[in-house]
Image (spheres, helix red, strand yellow):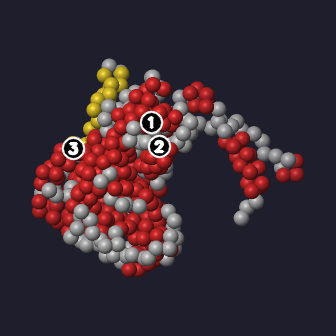
Amino acid sequence: MIEKNWLKKKAEMVRKADKIDPALYRKYGVKRGLRNDDGTGVLVGLTTIGNVHGYVVDEGEKRAVPGQLFYRGINVEDMVNADKKEHRYGYEEAAYLLMFGDLPTEKQLKEWNDKLGVFRKPSDGFKENAILRHPSTDVMNTIARATLFAMAFEEVPEAEAMNDLSIEKCLERSIAIISTMPTIAAYAYQAKAHYHMGQPLMIRNPDPKLSTAENFLSLIREDGKFSKLEAETLDLALILHAEHGGGNNSSFTTHLVTSAHTDIYSSVAASILSLKGSRHGGANLKVMRQMDEIKREVKNWTKKEDVIKYLERIADKKAGDKTGLIYGLGHAVYTISDPRAVMLKAKARQLAKEKGREDEMALFELIEKEGPKIIKSRHPRAEDVCANVDLYSGFVYDMMGVPRDLYTPLFAIARCVSWCAHRMEELINEGPIIRPAYKPLIHPRKYVELKNR
C-alpha cells in the first residue's frame, strides 16, 4: 500500500506536468476525439461492414434525417421484420451477414448454426482456469481475461498461434469466440455471484441446438426456463447491438490493435475493455440508475408534471449525477430517431404487458417525449435530440431479470461478431500501422546532473 499523502503530492505533480491549455487545441487545429468542428467524425478509414445513417450533408450543411442502420448494405429493420414474420431468431443470421458479406441460404444458415453450436461449451479445463479459479467482481474483466487465456488452449504453441494472421485461422478463431462468449459471460456472473455474493454456484451446459439468446437466458436462470417473448426480445437486442460502423470506440480499437499485427485474442480483449468504459458500453446502466432515482425521489412518478419538474432539476445539474445529462437521450449520429430504440421500444411494450410493468413503460415513454424539449430549452443551438437504444435496453433486461452485472457483457456478446469482421477487414486491406500525430509542446531543455538539482 502506498501512502496517501505521497500519492496526493505526486498526483499534483502529474497534473501540473500534463495539463494543456485548451486554447492550444484550437490553435493547432487538433481534432479532439477524432471529431470535426460540426461533431462529425474525422474520416480515417473505409468499411463495407456497417453504416449508421442519421444525417446528410447538403451544400456543406449537415441536415438531420430519420436514423437508419445498415449491415452490409441491408437495412436492419428489414431483417428484424422478416424474423418476426417467419417466427425465428435472427441474431445468427445477422452474424453470418456481418462475417461473410451476404445473407445465408437456409442450408448455409443451418450449417452456420451447427458450427456455432459446436463451440458453445468451453472445455472443463478452460472453465476452471480462466473463469472459476480467480473470479473477478467485474464480469467484463473476466470475459477479457478469459479471451486472452484462450490462446493457451490452442493446439499449436502460443508463438505460432500469435503469428498466424491468415484469414482462414482468423475465421476459425472468430467462430470459437462468437460461440463461446455468451457462455463465458454467464459463467463469469455465476462465479461472481457464488464467490463474492454468497449464492449457490450454478453452472449449466449450453444446448448446441438453441439460439444465442435462448442459451444465455437458460444459463443465467436457476430453472433454465424462459418465455418465447423473452427470447425474442433478447434476440432483437443482440441484433441491434451487433454492429455500428467502424468508427465507434471499440470497433476502432479493433482496427487500431489489428494494425499492429497482434493476435485475435488480444484484439478482441482490447475491444472488450474499450466497450467496458462508461462512455461506451455502460450507458444503459446510467439510464437505469437515473430511473431508480426518479422513481425514488418523485413521489408520484405516474404524474406527468412531477416527472417533468424532476427532469428539469436533472438538466439544471441539481439532481442526478449533477452532469446535466438526461441519460438515454441524444446520440452522436442519430438526431430525429434512433432506429434501434424504435424497434426495441415496440418489443419493450409487449414485454411490459406480459410482466405487468406498463406503468414503468409509460414513464420511459414520457421521458422520451418530454426530455428532448427540456434539453432544447437549455441548449437552443443543440441539434434535435431523440431517444437512443440505451433508454430501453436496460429496462428490457430488467424486465427479463437479467442482473445489471450482465448489461454491458450482453453488449459485448452481440458486438464481438462485428469486432471479428472488422479485424478481417483490416487484415485483408492491410495498410500501415495506425499512428495519428501528437504535437509536442515542451521545448528541449538541458539535463541537470543529480547533484545540481
* Residue at (17% x, 66% y) in the render: 111
User: Residue 452's spot in the image, x, y percent?
Assistant: 88, 48
Depth check: 174 or 330 in front?
A: 330
* Residue at (42% x, 55% y) in the render: 408
- Check if mark 1's residue and mark 3's residue have beta carbons within 8 Å: no
Q: Residue furthest right?
A: 451
What whole-number distance in Å separates the C-alpha atoms at marks 1 and 3?
35 Å
Q: Which SS class for mark 1?
A: helix
Depth check: 242 or 254 in front?
A: 242
Q: Residue furthest bottom?
A: 124
Q: Amino acid at mark 2?
A: Lys
- N-terminal label among 2 and 1: 2
Q: Which residue is mark 3?
A: 77
For the question of whether residue 125 can be seen, the reply is: yes
Depth check: 264 or 243 in front?
A: 243
What whole-number distance in Å separates the C-alpha atoms at marks 2 and 1?
8 Å
Q: Which SS class for mark 2?
A: loop
> Which label sits on residue 306?
1
Q: Which residue is mark 2?
A: 299
Numbered disc in front, either 3 or 2? 2
- N-terminal label among 3 and 2: 3
Numbered disc in front, either 1 or 3? 1
Q: In the shown orientation, is residue 90 left or right of residue 382?
A: left
Q: Amino acid at mark 1?
A: Asp
User: Residue 60's spot in the image, x, y percent?
Assistant: 35, 21
* Residue at (71% x, 38% y) in the render: 444
- Check if mark 2's residue and mark 1's residue have beta carbons within 8 Å: yes
Q: Compared to 226, does 373 lie above or below?
A: above
What whole-number distance in Å separates the C-alpha atoms at marks 3 and 2?
38 Å
- N-terminal label among 1 and 3: 3
Q: In the shown orientation, is residue 437 left or right of residue 287?
A: right
Q: Which SS class for mark 3?
A: helix
